[in-house]
């Protein structure tokens, strides 16, 4: 078994599309606009390897920041392949004001940094 895709609700669909393409070289399908679910739009975003990310929007969504300790997914982790790649992407994120935690070795052995997507969701970038 494997995860086929992970879905993320957002109030900023186009900002997410640009973010994932810019930071992670994601390839997007053509925007899906539902005929049966008024206002629902989404993109499937494919990275080089692994599961696909579906970013979805619909009118009336509310925003909840991940640091509110609510239930649900806490973050997604994306493996970049090396410490050097983590450092480079973290530097870029810092320059754009979206770096949450600088690169470091964690207690569970990962070399990681944490950045935020356009809605403030946490993304661990790991070696």
Image (tube, helix red, strand yellow):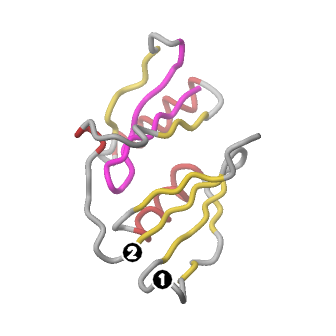
Q: Is the residue 56 above or below the residue 117 in the image?
A: below
Residue carrying label 2: 58
Residue most extreme to the right: 1
Residue 48 spot, x, y in % from top left = 71, 48
- Residue at 56% of width from left, 69% of height from top? 43
Q: Residue at x 31, y 35 (%)?
A: 100
Q: Is residue 72 magenta?
A: no
Up/down of 47 relative to 74, above or below: below
The reply to whether discs 1 and 2 touch (Cβ–Cβ < 8 Å) is: yes
Q: For the C terminus, which image quadrant?
A: top right
Q: Which quadrant of the view contains residue 30?
A: bottom right
Bounds of the magenta segment: 109-127
Label 1, label 2: how far apart the Cα atoms are: 9 Å
Left/right placement of residue 23 relative to residue 103 reads: right
Residue 84 percent coordinates (x, y):
57, 26
Q: Quadrant of the N terminus?
A: top right
Which of the 4 quarters of the picture holds residue 97? top left
Front residue of 20/34: it is 34
- Look at 48% across and 82% down and name the residue there: 37
Assign a secondary structure to mark 1. Answer: loop
Left or right of 9, for residue 20: right
Q: Nearer the viewer, residue 113 or 73?
A: 73
């Amino acid at each position: 078994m494997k995860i086929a895709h992970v879905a993320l609700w957002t109030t900023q669909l186009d900002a997410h599309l640009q973010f994932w393409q810019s930071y992670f070289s994601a390839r997007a399908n053509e925007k899906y606009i539902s005929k049966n679910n008024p206002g629902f739009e989404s993109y499937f975003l494919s990275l080089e390897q692994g599961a696909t990310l579906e970013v979805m929007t619909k009118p009336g969504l509310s925003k909840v920041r991940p640091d509110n300790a609510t239930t649900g997914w806490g973050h997604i982790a994306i493996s970049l392949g090396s410490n050097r790649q983590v450092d480079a992407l973290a530097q870029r994120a810092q320059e754009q004001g979206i770096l949450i935690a600088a690169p470091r070795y964690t207690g569970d052995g990962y070399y990681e940094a944490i950045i935020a997507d356009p809605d403030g969701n946490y993304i661990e970038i790991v070696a």
